[in-house]
């Protein structure tokens, strides 16, 4: 059969939204702390007392962490990986030998069967030595073949592929295309049914692990035909299959050791037995995979925070200016306090979300998304503050520092490595929209037909009645609550009074829900276009979630006699800092520059301000921008040979 040319998808905004909405998990079969928070209901009982891992799981996890720490300290040279932009083959082989590629795979398939909590601790540990290695392991297990197989694979598929993933094979996840980022409706890679096979054609971009992978999880669109419902579907593809070409190994500002490339599929035959789930379920599988898969990224961010704190403490203790250690100067001390308090909060968010994922008694789709969003933003801020604290030495590379006899601290590298986390697995802007969609789900559910321009007047009238009944019951509950009673949450008073912060969270959750309702009333069907407003709503929710997690973790540590007093101090400091940010965000819900920003953007796009661009040269030296340029053919120079 002839190879179809993958088309550039031209879809309307409505069609694109419909694809995303159909893939979204719409039912809430389990309770969700974060969902309730956005609705103005502070359900502390859903996270307190803090869940704990089973004794056996903790023992197994600690044993592996000890083994991984020894390997990390003796076998991994982060400076070498940064310098040569590649993870040595012997390091990859060593990681396979100790089982690091099977951390999340069940023991019956040859894996270690670690919990999400200990998997995250392992990624934070190895990431402190080399973020590129942590990315290799995470991309393989968090979004690569093991996770979608665990969620939607058949028993036969698990028996065939999971033992390979646990010990010998590296997997990669291929969704993004040169002209398709966060809009899957425009997916151009096709999988055409042909007997007992599918034939895949297309190009995938930014395929982390794709350059060295043995197994590829590929998202492709199946055309609708007789016997085939079609739609975006998920396939496991052998990387050695004829017709697969790795056309480039991409290079980035950070994570210089990752194996990320461009992969072309030309008439690649894949057995139908390798399809995960039914046709059309691919995007839903991908989004469900990310519910827990996203937690690996904030885990590495929390680890980065720990490293920032360690370096900041050691440097400021040794460095003096004007007769005092620089940490004693308030301008520097406030940065150190921010790093310490925020690191405590990030670890609290990650551990709480991960433990809830392990228990599987809560719906954590919003919690994991908030963890990813918040941790990626805050970790980058912490690294930026560390560079500032280090001054010129923070801007200087570790290699240069070592060359002139100073300690080789790669602060600037950390800043570069962390930058991608605000883009990986959903950019901050996309995460705002994703979380906001879930946060306003209750409003859209009752007002759907009311704000749908295509619905009839009778449908709108019925929707209006339903919405009136919902809000008549819901709004009065947002007027008062435990946050207004001084005696509430008294169990969080031990020297430092954390109950005041929980009362603030309760009051702010109701205030946030009221603000969301006001926005819904004001803009109705245009609410989804108010991305600035929705982003601030989500950021407030993220801060409130982090405050809650911090207080609950502090109380856990106190109850177990493990640094309880210090934990209370850190939680108190974080909550005080977070409250300042929350109040600013509340103010910006209604006092902002969103309208003038839109007018300026229109002027930029229409060429009104091109005169402002005069006086510089284009460093690329190229002509007009081609937004959907496809990669060229493979050459000897740009194809990186996989590790085998």
Image: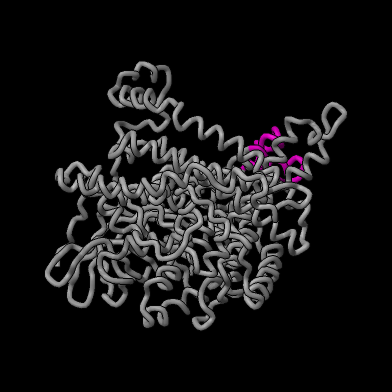
Q: Nearer the viewer, residue 134 or 400?
A: 134
Magenta residues (range): 385-412
Q: Is residue 273 magenta?
A: no
Q: Quadrant of residue 268?
A: bottom left
- The spot of residue 397 in percent (x, y) is 65, 41
- The spot of residue 146 in percent (x, y) is 45, 71
Q: Is residue 80 visible?
A: no
- The vertical placement of 613 against 76, above or below, is above
- The spot of residue 190 in percent (x, y) is 23, 60
Most extreme residue toward the right is: 323
Look at 54% across and 42% down and name the residue there.
508
- The vertical placement of 40 against 559, above or below, is above
- The spot of residue 449 in percent (x, y) is 23, 47
Q: Is residue 617 visible?
A: yes
Q: Nearer the viewer, residue 41 or 196?
A: 41
Left or right of 604? Residue 65 is right
Most common secondary structure along the magenta stretch: helix
Q: Quadrant of residue 359?
A: bottom right
Look at 26% across and 58% down and name the residue there.
189
- The vertical placement of 119 against 599, above or below, is below
Q: Is residue 410 magenta?
A: yes
């Amino acid at each position: 059969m002839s190879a179809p040319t993958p088309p550039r998808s031209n879809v309307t905004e409505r069609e694109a939204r419909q694809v995303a909405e159909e893939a979204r998990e719409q039912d809430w079969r389990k309770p969700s702390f974060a969902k309730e928070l956005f609705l103005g209901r502070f359900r502390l009982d859903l996270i307190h007392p803090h869940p704990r891992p089973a004794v056996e799981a903790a023992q197994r996890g600690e044993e592996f962490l000890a083994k991984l720490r020894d390997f990390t300290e003796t076998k991994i040279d982060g400076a070498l990986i940064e310098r040569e932009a590649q993870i040595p083959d012997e390091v990859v082989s060593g990681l396979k030998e100790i089982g690091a590629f099977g951390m999340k795979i069940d023991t019956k398939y040859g894996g270690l069967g670690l919990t999400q909590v200990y998997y995250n601790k392992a990624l934070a540990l190895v990431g402190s030595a080399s973020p590129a290695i942590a990315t290799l392991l995470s991309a393989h297990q968090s979004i690569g073949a093991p996770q979608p197989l665990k969620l939607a694979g058949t028993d036969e598929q698990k028996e065939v592929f999971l033992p390979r993933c646990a010990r010998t094979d590296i997997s990669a996840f291929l969704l993004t295309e040169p002209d398709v980022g966060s809009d899957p409706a425009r997916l151009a890679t096709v999988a055409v049914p042909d007997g007992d096979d599918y034939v895949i054609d297309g190009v995938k971009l930014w395929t982390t692990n794709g350059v060295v992978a043995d197994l590829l999880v590929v998202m492709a669109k199946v055309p609708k035909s007789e016997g085939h419902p079609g739609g975006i579907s998920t396939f496991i593809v052998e990387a050695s299959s004829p017709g697969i070409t790795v056309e480039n190994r991409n290079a980035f500002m950070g994570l210089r050791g990752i194996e990320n490339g461009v992969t072309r599929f030309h008439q690649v035959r894949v057995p139908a037995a390798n399809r995960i789930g039914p046709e059309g379920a691919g995007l839903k599988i991908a989004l469900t995979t990310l519910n827990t898969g996203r937690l690996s990224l904030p885990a590495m961010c929390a680890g980065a925070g720990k490293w920032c704190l360690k370096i900041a403490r050691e440097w400021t203790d040794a460095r003096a200016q004007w007769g005092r250690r620089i940490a004693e100067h308030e301008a520097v001390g406030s940065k150190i306090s921010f790093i310490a308090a925020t690191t405590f909060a990030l670890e609290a968010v990650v551990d709480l979300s991960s433990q809830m994922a392990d228990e599987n008694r809560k719906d954590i789709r919003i919690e994991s998304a908030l963890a990813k969003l918040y941790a990626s933003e805050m970790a980058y801020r912490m690294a930026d503050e560390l560079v500032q604290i280090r001054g010129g030495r923070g801007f200087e590379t570790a290699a240069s520092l070592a060359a002139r006899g100073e300690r080789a601290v790669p602060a600037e590298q950390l800043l570069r490595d962390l930058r991608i986390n605000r883009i990986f697995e959903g950019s901050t802007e996309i995460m705002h929209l994703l979380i906001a969609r879930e946060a306003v789900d209750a409003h859209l559910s009752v007002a759907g037909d009311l704000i749908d321009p295509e619905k009839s007047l009778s449908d709108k009238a019925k929707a209006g009645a339903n919405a009136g009944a919902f809000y008549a019951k819901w709004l009065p509950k947002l007027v008062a609550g435990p946050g207004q009673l001084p005696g509430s949450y008294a169990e969080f008073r031990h020297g430092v009074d954390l109950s005041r912060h929980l009362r603030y969270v309760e009051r702010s959750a109701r205030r946030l829900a009221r603000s969301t309702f006001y926005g819904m009333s004001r803009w109705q069907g245009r609410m989804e276009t108010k991305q600035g407003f929705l982003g601030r709503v989500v950021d407030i929710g993220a801060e409130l979630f982090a405050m809650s997690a911090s207080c609950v973790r502090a109380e856990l540590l106190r109850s177990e006699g493990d640094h309880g007093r210090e934990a209370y101090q850190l939680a108190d400091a974080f909550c005080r800092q977070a409250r300042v940010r929350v109040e600013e965000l509340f103010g910006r819900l209604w006092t902002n520059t969103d309208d003038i920003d839109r007018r300026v953007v229109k002027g930029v796009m229409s060429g009104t301000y091109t005169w402002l661009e005069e006086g510089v040269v284009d460093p690329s030296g190229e002509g007009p921008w081609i937004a959907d340029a496809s990669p060229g053919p493979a050459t000897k120079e740009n194809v990186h040979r996989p590790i085998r």
